[in-house]
Amino acid sequence: MAAAKKVVLGPLVAAVDQGTSSTRFLVFNQKHHHQVEIKQEFPREGWVEQDLKEILQSIYECIEKTCDKLGQLNIDISNIKDIGVRNQRETTVVWDKLTGEPLYNALVWLYLRTQSTVENLSKRILGNNNFVKSKTGFPLSTYFSAVKLPWLLDNVREVQKAVEENTALLGTIDSWLIWSFDRRSQWMCPLYGCNNSSEIYGLMKAGALEGVPISGCLGDQSAALVGQMCFQDRQAKNMYGTGCFLLCNTGHKCVFPEHGLLTTVAYKLAGAIICWLRDNLGIIKSSEEIEKLAKEVGTSYGCYFVPAFSGLYAPYWEPSARGIICGLTQFTNKCHITFAALEAVCFQTREILDEMNRSCGIPLSHLQVDGGMTSNKILMQLQADILYIPVVKPSMPETTAFGAAMAAGAAEGVGIWSLEPEDLSAVTMERFEPQINAEESEIRYSTWKKAVMKSIGWVTTQSPEIGPVTFGADPLHCHNVLLHSL
């Protein structure tokens, strides 16, 4: 019997999608269609420290399973011409450059035990935290990678020894992954002269795709901005999923806002409200149920939710805040609270978008969205109502992985894709128009702002060391804001 004929699709581009709670490997063709997805869950999902060997093994397993799946479809894996990497940002890694062994677990962005480092640095700057922001674009915060290194130096003997012996390498997780894929290639990102996001960094040195170039590398939400094709000045998009990120392209001009936003990325731990409703209150059994409950009432009945579980971040940067629910009456039930939870995500997006508009000078005409939560039509309609501009959702949901694949395919020496606007394919969109008047939108938003003010000042002292934090399997962490210059 003759062997099955291999399917010819033209060149394919793959993307490693390495997130906080899972690893995926996706393959796209030139028509931008996602071909195959393999997902590898981590057994300790949501922990603020992660096992780096486990992460690397999960990627190789995903690659092998994807190649097996392509073989079952009679697709030749030699059609995969390059690989892009999309990774979780701010997760910090230290490893030995001689052995390749990690010297400690990866410290994830949510690692709060560095709070004492932040407080000590703040004291040394004599109250002028704007000095740090003027140099880096960031305020002092436990979120960013730089403050994690002093904690490692102070608390991990293996790191101290490697630094003394000049064998320690420090990077975010993308640097470590590419270094591991290419078996200690010359690709390294020095503190000065950083690599582009779209260039050949090295070749895969092991596994089913040995010899395939690694030619794209983007942080998760930067990848989503590219995947949504937001290449024009003042285009913005918001992701609702495991994360909820609001990003705005400021073109070639770096904008240094004065209202709590950053010239790169900021975040809000706001979307953990969904996890809290499920795991702490038991109102819902899964995140999918929230739309059903909210639909039963169609209103919060005057109930407002401020999910400041770990303080308020952008644009407030107020660690003394704590979560509150306002406006409860004897008629309030779990459906109203659920509706208020969805509104809270939308109100927070409105806060950030208002600051972006103020900083950029020109209001947005619409907001592009993506992520798993965009399947919730009530959330999307609420967002359009509260922003009072249209919300536009693409039909292809895998924008983060697609963005990494686009960067890889456009690299010099690969040339599979062009990122010029005239060469990009049109994407089918679903559009949500505002269905309330501007006055009602403003009243609801103003009441929300009043609730936010009530949440501030609950904590007057804070422990310098905060222990490990864990979340359930499906937290919706809302990290609002990217004023991003591509």
Image (tube, grey):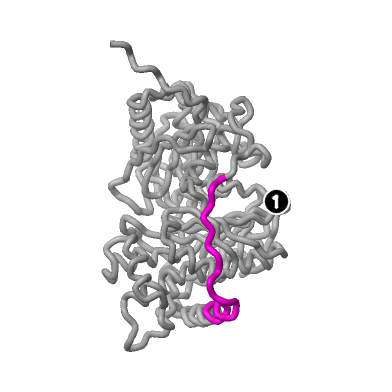
Q: Nearer the viewer, residue 302 or 216?
A: 302
Left or right: 474 as drawn, with respect to 439 = left
Q: Nearer the viewer, residue 160 or 59?
A: 59
Q: Point out residue 485 in the picture as x, y percentages from the top left corner.
A: 66, 51
Residue at 37 percent across and 59 percent down: it is: 475
Q: Vertically, is 281 above or below 32?
A: below
Dot 1 surroundings within 10 Å: few (below 14), some, or many (20 or more)? Answer: some
Magenta span: 427-445
Q: Point out residue 9 in the picture as x, y percentages from the top left corner.
A: 48, 26
| Residue tagged 1 | 251
Q: Vertically, is 14 above or below 113?
A: above
Residue at 45 percent across and 21 percent down: it is: 78
Q: Vertically, is 455 above or below 428?
A: below
Q: Is residue 437 magenta?
A: yes
Residue at the extreme bottom of the image, as rendered: 330
Q: Vertically, is 49 above or below 285?
A: above
Residue at 60 percent across and 66 percent down: it is: 389
Q: Quadrant of the N terminus?
A: top left
The amino acid type of the residue labelled 1 equals Gly
